[in-house]
Amino acid sequence: MMEFFDALRDPHAQFLRNALWIGLIGALPFGLIGTYVVVRRISYIAAAIAHSILGGVGFAAFAQSQWGWQAFDPTYGALLAAILSALVIGWVNLRFAEREDTVIGIIWVSGMAIGLIFLAKSPGYFDPMAFLFGDILLVGQGDLWRVGLLAGIVSLICIALSPQITAIALDPAFARIRGLRTQRLHYLMLILTALTIVLLVQLMGIILVVALLTLPPAIAAMRSRTLAGMVAIAVVLNALFIFGGLWLSYSLDWPSGPVIILLATSVFLLSLFRR
């Protein structure tokens, strides 16, 4: 443990401090949005949105190389694909619930297939594994500012609309009877989910984002009977998993992302058995 703290103080280990900061800052939107995702039981929707962004990334790379759209960064393509997928899934969820799983599966696989085709037709080499698994140790100062801005936006919206979000998360039918615009709120939460996924997926990878979006709130649900309690526990657990995963990966010389996922999974299984 002391070796890890010594490394954090090393002037040449800025990458390690950035990785820790990105995890601590990202813990807030992960806890807020992840709790909603778990309570509404829409984890598969979040996973579909996360995987579909590869289509936007591939399109952006193709547009840059073939059409000269240099300003069209892959992040913008990922954001466009994520928001479009979220809106389509939200519309299907509200209109054709009986076919929702089929449509989500189509968006999931077709988004990845489209992205791989675009990447294959783009000159040069673009590694899709960077988006699938990411590398939290490559976080820069600019990434910290972007994620900090995201955390602020998501937090302010969730705090301002906390009664309405709580209502549609726990009992959307009753909320609709009471006059809440549940459809608009549902779309808003899906868009916030898409934003959270996109701005963090390049840093942590699709698989790590989905894990941290669902596992900590799922553990928190076993320990709290209130939504506010779930959010608080999920935020703390996200921060602990990032810190513990970085420490273990540094000590064992293992990849950081997989270690963080395995740590979160182990705690979830332990909580499940103890319950």
Image: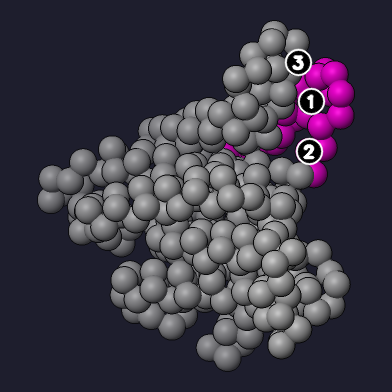
Q: Is residue 108 magenta?
A: yes
Disc 2 element:
loop
Q: Which residue is mark 2?
A: 128
Q: Give left or right: position of 111 versus 76.
A: right
Residue 49 spot, x, y in % from top left: 56, 41
Q: Few, some or many C-alpha atoms within 10 Å of disc 2 (few <14, some 14-19, many ≥20)?
A: some
Q: Which residue is mark 1?
A: 119
Q: Amino acid at mark 3?
A: Ser
Q: Is residue 168 above or below residue 272?
A: above
Residue 164 spot, x, y in % from top left: 22, 53
Report the quarter where the N terminus lies: bottom right
Q: Separation of disc 2 and disc 1 at Cα?
A: 8 Å
Q: Which residue is mark 3?
A: 65
Q: Is residue 262 above or below residue 91?
A: below
Q: Amino acid at mark 1?
A: Leu
Q: Quadrant of residue 142?
A: top right
Image point (49%, 42%), residue name: 194
Q: Quadrant of residue 167?
A: bottom left
Image point (81%, 32%), residue name: 126
Tag 3 and tag 1, C-beta contact below 8 Å: no
Q: What residue span does the magenta drawing correspond to?
A: 102-129
- 197 vs 36, nearest the viewer: 197
Q: Quadrant of residue 162?
A: bottom left
Q: Is residue 35 magenta?
A: no
Q: Separation of disc 3 and disc 2 at Cα?
A: 16 Å
Tag 2 and tag 1, C-beta contact below 8 Å: yes
Image point (66%, 75%), residue name: 9
